[in-house]
Amino acid sequence: MSEFGTSKEGASSVRPPLLKGDNYSSWKGKMEAYLSAIDDRVWMVIEDGFTPPTVTAEDESIVPKPKAQWSTEEFGASKWNNKAMHALLSAMDESQYKLIQITKNAHEAWKILETAHEGTEVVKDSKLLVLQTLFEIIRMEEHECLNDFQVKLMDIVNQSHQLGDPYSDSRIKQRIMRSLAPRFESKVTALEENVDFKKMKPSEVIGRLLAYESRKAPTSSSPKKQKGIALKTSKVEKEDNDSDEDVAQMVTRFKKFLWLQRNDSKKVEPSQEKSSIKGIQCFECGGYGHISKACTNLKKKRNGKEMATSSSDSESVEDSSSDEEC
C-alpha cells in the first residue's frame, strides 16, 4: 500500500489535511495553517522558495555546492524546505503526488498544485467572475437556517480569497444584511442603526443574528407548523362536511321511504292484500284466510235466522186471519 493518503484527515492535529483533487480550495487554506503551525519559516519557504547553494567551477560555470561545504545558514534553509516538502507529500493521495513527483522544491511543488487546480491567470479571472456573480445574487431562503446560509456565503468568500480577490469585512457585512430572509428585517434595521455597526466584524454580526434566530425559533417555524395545522384542519373540515352530506342524504332517503310506505298502505294490490291476510284465522268457523265479519258461515246463520223469523211472522198473520173469519 502506498504511503500517500493512508492517514485519515482530521484524526489528529499532527496529520495534515488530505488533498484528493476535488477539495483543493479548502485544502489550500487548511494546508497553509498546517505549515505555519510547524514553523513560520516552513511557510516562508513555500512563499519565497528555496535556492540550493551553488559555487562557481573552474570553468566559470555554476554548479551545485557540495553539502560538505554548506554553511550553517544554508543547512538551515534546506531544513525548512525539506520539512515543507515532507508535509506536502504527506498531505495528498497517489494521484496528486504524481503531479509533483519530479520536484524537490516545496515552493515549486506548491505552484504546480496551484496551477493544476486553479488554472492559469486567465482561468483564475474566469473563476473570479463566476464567484463575484454568486456573491452578488446569493439569497437566504425563507425556511433556511442562518448557519447553512453562512456556510454558502463564506465558501464563496474563501474561494475568492484563495484566487487572490479577498473581500473586505465591510463588503461581507453588507452582503449578509442584504441577503437575509424577510424574517430578519427588524433585526437588520436594529443592527444598521447601531452606532458600533461599522466596527463590527462579520463574525460578530453573524453571532448577533444567530442569537436573534435562536430567540425567534418558535416564531420562525410557526408558518410551517401553521401550514400543517391548516392542512389538517381543512382535512377535518372536509371530512365533517362529507359526514354532514352523508347524514343529509340518509335523512332524505328515509323520508322518501316513509312517504312511499304511506302511499303503499293506501293503495294495496289485490294480490298483496290476499297474501297479507292468508295467515289470519276466523273466530267464527276456525278457518284461515278471512276474518269473522267476512265469514260465509256467519252470513248463512244470519240468513237462516232471518228466514225463520219471517216464516214465523207469516204463520202468525195467517192464524189471526183465520180467527177473524170464524
Image: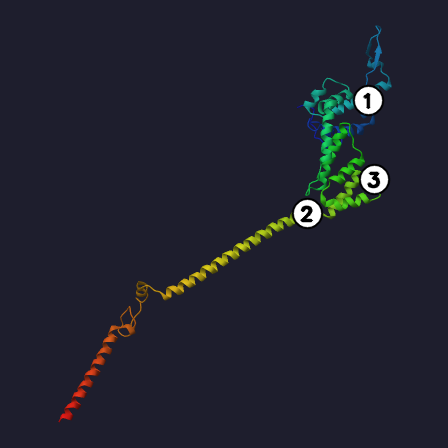
Q: Label 2 belongs to which residue?
A: 221
Q: Is residue 245 above or below residue 169?
A: below
Q: Label 3 belongs to which residue?
A: 198
Residue 91, position in %: x, y?
73, 26
Say how the picture is coloured.
rainbow
Check disc 2 and report its element: helix, strand or loop: helix
Check disc 1 and report its element: helix, strand or loop: helix
Check whether the beta carbons of the residues at disc 2 and disc 3 lie within 8 A of each other: no
For the residue carrying disc 2, how many other residues have a C-alpha within 10 Å: few (<14), some (14-19), or many (20+)?
few
Q: CA distance from mark 2 to mark 1?
A: 53 Å
Give whichever of 261, 32 is nearer the camera.
261
Q: Quadrant of the C terminus?
A: bottom left
* Left or right, 37 with reference to 267: right
For the residue carrying disc 1, how many other residues have a C-alpha within 10 Å: few (<14), some (14-19), or many (20+)?
few
Q: Label 1 belongs to which residue?
A: 48
Which tag is nearer the camera, tag 2 or tag 1?
Answer: 2
* Left or right, 247 with reference to 201: left
Give whichever of 323, 88 is nearer the camera.
323
Q: Residue furthest front?
A: 325
Which residue: 25% across, 75% down? 299
Check disc 3 and report its element: helix, strand or loop: helix
Q: Earlier in the sequence, mark 2 or mark 1?
A: 1
Q: Amino acid at mark 1?
A: Asp
For the residue carrying disc 3, how many other residues have a C-alpha within 10 Å: few (<14), some (14-19), or many (20+)?
few
Q: Amino acid at mark 3?
A: Lys
Q: CA distance from mark 1 to mark 3?
A: 36 Å
Q: Amino acid at mark 2?
A: Ser
Image quadrant of residue 180? top right
Give whichever of 47, 283 is nearer the camera.
283
Q: Earlier in the sequence, mark 1 or mark 3?
A: 1
Residue 150, position in %: x, y?
73, 38
